[in-house]
Image: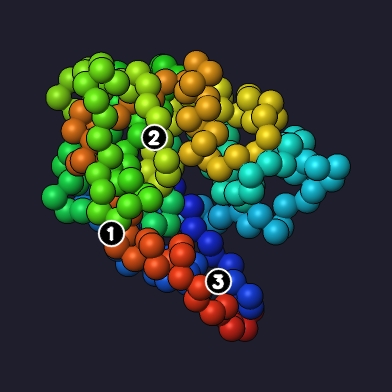
Amino acid sequence: MLTRVIAVTQLGNGVHSKFAKRNLHVRNTLIPSLAQIGLSAEIFPAIIGSSVKVSNGAALHDSLEIPLGEGCIGNLLSNYELWKLSVLTGQSVLILEDDAILPSQNAQFVADAIRSFQQSHQDQPDILYLLSQSPFIKDTFKRYAPSELKVINSSISRLIRTSDLACTAAYMVTPFSARRLMERITKSKTIPTDGYVHTAQMDGAIGIVVQTDPTKGFMLNENWAEWNHKHDPLVKMEPS
């Protein structure tokens, strides 16, 4: 299994200060917390939307023309490249964004869910969704009604349906689910990665597995609201 954290690494002139903060969080907090449960994480340099070539209303990437829609093309393409990594290596990939955090009290629950998913879903087009927090309301946990879940074991359950898959800050793809996601990327207008994944589930392209206790996964860094909604000044840095 591979573990990658999507983070902006080119912190030059004009980069928003939130990315500098997040980069420190990734290196000093997130990656060490993953190491404690035996996960060797590497940083995957995020694709910046402004660097993507656009022609005739489509983003040009990897010989693809992806119809432009609701922004977030850089985020979607960053995830796309990690789906491709899963397919090329034949390994599942744990994908994290730079505002994910693993509380120490949840570490063993996450490790158990990952282990269980690997043992039972490696050859299935499923995603393991590991985010516990609703991103729209600080400190609010995700919860699913019993009718929305089919329990697999004490660690993981299949999510039959939901109205909320918001925020793909922590999830895991298999080569099979990664291929399904890659195959359909040109079939609908660009939407944020979480919306894209949710649409794929609703269309029946992939399945979603969650922790049986969905409150025991990754959270969003406590400064999430500040980083995303406060208008911090641009960082003035000399190119490295």
- Label drawn at residue 164: 2
From mark 1 to mark 3, how far is it between C-alphas?
Answer: 25 Å
Front residue of 140/15: it is: 140
Extreme residue in the right direction: 56
Q: Is residue 102 left or right of residue 73?
A: left
- x, y percent for residue 5: 43, 51
How far across and down, in percent of the image, does residue 67 sit?
Answer: 73, 37
Q: Nearer the viewer, mark 2 or mark 3?
A: 2
- The CA distance from mark 2 to mark 3 is 28 Å
Q: Which mark is residue 98?
A: none
Quadrant housing residue 210:
top left
Callout 2–callout 3 Cβ contact below 8 Å: no
Q: Is residue 220 left or right of residue 235?
A: left
Instruction: Inspect the image, locate mark 1, and give the three-letter code of the amino acid beneath it.
Output: Pro
Q: Which of marks 1 and 2 precedes in the sequence?
A: 1
Residue displayed at 64% across by 44% down: 70
The reply to whether dot 1 and dot 3 touch (C-beta < 8 Å) is: no
In the picture, which quadrant includes the C terminus? Answer: bottom right
Q: Residue at x 72, y 37 (%)?
A: 66
Per the rendering, the mark at residue 32 is: 1
N-term-proximal mark, 1 vs 3 = 3
* Residue at disc 1, secondary structure: helix
Residue 155 lies left or right of residue 164; in this view the side is: left
Mark seen at residue 16: 3
| Mark 1 Cα-neighbour bin, 10 Å: few <14, some 14–19, many ≥20 | some
Image quadrant where residue 57 sits: top right
Measured Cα–Cα span from mark 2 to mark 1:
29 Å
What amino acid is at disc 3?
A: His
**x 29%, y 62%: residue:** 222
Q: Residue at x 52, y 36 (%)?
A: 195
The spot of residue 172 in percent (x, y) is 39, 35
